[in-house]
Image (tube, grey):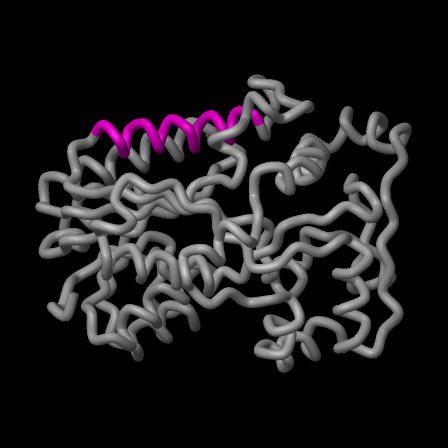
Amino acid sequence: MSATHTVFVSAATGSQGSNLARQLRSIGWNVHATVRNPDTPAAKTLTEQGVELTVGDWDDEAALQASIAGCDMLFLNLSPSFQNLGSERVQAARILAIAKAAGVRHVVYSSGPAAKHIEKLPIWNAKSLVGLTLLSKQAIEETLKAAGFEAWTILRGSTFMQNFLAPKVAMYAGLVDTNTWTMALLAGEKMPLVDANDIAKFAVAAFQDPERFKGKDVVVVGDELTPEEIMECLSEVTGRKLKFVALTDAEIEAQKAVNPLITAQLALRELKNFMKAEESRSWGIPMTTFKDFLAHNKDLVKQTYP
């Protein structure tokens, strides 16, 4: 497909969206996006790349209509609001309705890794924070499939490699300060990882070859490492002695009462059962290993682990 297309990219200042916008602009495609503040460094970078920005958010229907106008493709990537877990579903429905009315033909949705397999999770609880979030993702998938677009594609990225670098590393309390990664993961068990840039690669591939990706549910995994191996990789490039410590069952039970996100860590234990790097590589798209990711981002590694 050699023609120039125009893609609306949601969350264009985020890890996935920024990589996608850059890749699309590099092949000469037009990119539209909304931003709340056009003066942030991330928004300014988009402008410098030639992305057409409209000031607004996902609740601003007029801004969305203006930004999606003229687009024939859409990348949907929304984040849940823990203050209002129903907002993600409402925002997705709004964006998809506007896109359909504007003539968008192909939608690529970056969904949750476990949204397709929620009932298979041993810790599944529909009323938990994780459960409600996954149900929202699942509902958005069904809305997309029923919306009547010429093509849709669902991408499922695994744990982001970006989580181990600033600013996202803040979610792992103590890792940078104490060199210890304490999680409710299982020692010695492989976990799937992905570079957000690889999710963007798959989105570009889907947009360029809609017939191949039409109606496909695609797992995106670049590497499979144990928690100990992840810390070894980080230790090698930072010069620090980083280690993994698994929470005990008693510690996990104690945290459940005060930390609703502990169930998300327990869910990560199960991703290896239905997210395989081999499946991702079968598409023929070059994938990034964790070691390669750290090498590509060596400056940020140094900033994160001074």
Q: Is residue 48 left or right of residue 62?
A: right
User: Is 247 located above or below residue 47 in the figure?
Assistant: above
Q: How many marks?
A: 0
Q: Position of residue 31 (x, y in %)?
A: 23, 64
Q: Position of residue 87 (x, y in %)?
A: 39, 32
At horizontal 32% and vertical 66% (from top left) the residue drawn is 21
Q: Which quadrant of the rendered structure holds the C terminus?
A: bottom right
Q: Is residue 36 left or right of residue 2?
A: right
Residue positioned most to the bottom = 299
At horizontal 59% and vertical 76% (from top left) the residue drawn is 297
Q: Is residue 29 left or right of residue 238?
A: left
| Prevailing secondary structure of the magenta residues | helix
Q: Position of residue 156 (x, y in %)?
A: 46, 45
Viewer-proximal residue, 129 or 19?
19
Viewer-proximal residue, 136 or 282?
282
Reply yes or no: does residue 38 show up in magenta.
no
The part of the image, by quadrant, that contains residue 118 is top right
At horizontal 35% and vertical 44% (from top left) the residue drawn is 109
Q: Which quadrant of the rendered structure holds the N terminus?
A: bottom left
Q: Is residue 36 left or right of residue 161?
A: left
User: Is 200 located above or below residue 105 in the figure?
Assistant: below
Reply yes or no: does residue 135 show up in magenta.
yes
Viewer-proximal residue, 127 or 84?
127
At horizontal 32% and vertical 36% (from top left) the residue drawn is 91
User: Is 125 located above or below residue 57 in the figure?
Assistant: above
Magenta-colored span: 131-146
Q: Position of residue 227 (x, y in %)?
A: 77, 53
